[in-house]
Image (cartoon, grey):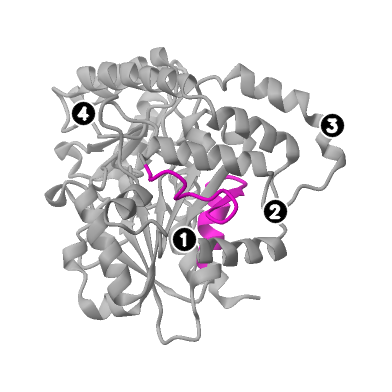
Amino acid sequence: MNPDLSRLQPYPFEKLAQLKAGIVPNKALRAINLAIGEPKHSPPSFVTEEVLTHLHGLANYPTTKGMPALREAIANWLTQRFSLPSDSIDAERHVLPVNGTREALFAFAQTVVDRSQPAPLVMSPNPFYQIYEGAAFLAGAEPYFINTTAESDWLPDFDSVPDEAWQRCQLLYLCSPSNPTGAVIEKETLTQLIELAEKFDFVIASDECYSEIYFDEANPPIGLLEAAAVIGNTDYKRCVVFHSLSKRSNLPGMRSGFVAGDAELISKFLLYRTYHGCAMAPYAQHASITAWRDEQHVVENRTYYREKFSAVIGILDDVIEISHPAASFYLWLKTPAVLNGDDAEFALQLYQQKNINLLPGCYLSREAHGINPGSGYARIALVAPLDECIEAAKRIKDFIINI
């Protein structure tokens, strides 16, 4: 067996299940799940109709590279959404469809990490999406965690990373907007990171799956390719972004996303994926084309989230330390002082007394540089319908008041 498999930690939801094992929740209250970031808004009907229309495609093998029309739709969306220079994104060279970004984020590390080099590092924010850590281990590298804290406005403290660590870095994962905090990395920081990648010869993989869930229509989150173009890196050297229809279009079950950026890296990733056997089903490709070409359903989606955040924060902000995120559908809240900041205990008691599931922050982070930055916080995914989110907020408020 691959010995690195033994280094993989249980997934956060496995830990949550273990925490709740044997505990009976309050059956007088309906269960409300705020733990899993699975969108619950209805998928666009025109996309599901496209799926049904193209089911005959099941008789054909799809290509790993994807249909030219899909790659073209993605290239056009990227160019328009991130104000990229005209024709700087070549659908043939810079874009690769993937079956959701989770498997692509994992597989990308297997492609770019050179395990023949001494002690390679894969860097990521902390708290983080656990795929980054597992990808590092199974690529033969060590994860290096960059803490995000309230003091750094929940952005990774890149200035804390010493040069010797940057010298060993082969891959830097970013997550902006962040899971779990909703923080957005600004243009100046992104351009500095691109310059560091050039100086120390590493690759930046930017997980931008939450980029289309934001609250100021006039100020969408910037992306890595956008920052690269600003400084003249229109070849997008060392820069790769990951996007998905799961959150943007409420289509998590379709497993549709893409990777785009540095043409040389995309070429090598295509080679890896060809052997890996990854190809998006034809019906999903056709449906994805229609989704990437339409923005109205995305604007409506943001409206629903805006309503939920406004309602929930309005209920909770006088009983717990909470702030509105810049983007994403997560609330990152500080657990009550009366519980000594014990986020696991907070989650357990809420489940037992109020039949609410949320995720302890410590399950999303690791102890690094002397602290576990997720400890004392909890992640709430506001994916349930508005009425459930409001009811959950009222239960949480009642719980806090009566602890």
Q: Position of residue 171 (x, y in %)?
A: 40, 68
Q: Nearer the viewer, residue 344 or 310?
A: 310
Residue 243 sits inside the magenta stretch: no
For this orientation, the residue located farthest to the front is 86
Please tell me how crowded label 1 is: few (under 14), some (14-19), or many (20+) other residues with Cα within 10 Å: many
In this rendering, position of residue 192 left or right of residue 259: left
Please give the residue where the numbered disc 1 appears in the rendered image. Answer: 262
Mark drawn on residue 56: 3
Q: Secondary structure at mark 1?
A: loop
Q: Earlier along the polypeptide chain: callout 1 or callout 3?
A: 3
> What's the residue type where badge 2 is placed?
Thr
Please give the residue where the numbered disc 4 appears in the rendered image. Answer: 403
Q: Earlier along the polypeptide chain: callout 1 or callout 4?
A: 1
Disc 2 and disc 1 in contact, CB within 8 angstroms: no
What span is in magenta? 84-109
Please tell me how crowded label 4 is: few (under 14), some (14-19), or many (20+) other residues with Cα within 10 Å: few
Residue 97 sits inside the magenta stretch: yes
Q: CA distance from mark 3 to mark 2?
A: 19 Å
Please give the residue where the numbered disc 2 appears in the rendered image. Answer: 64
Q: CA distance from mark 2 to mark 1?
A: 18 Å
91 relative to 304, above or below: below
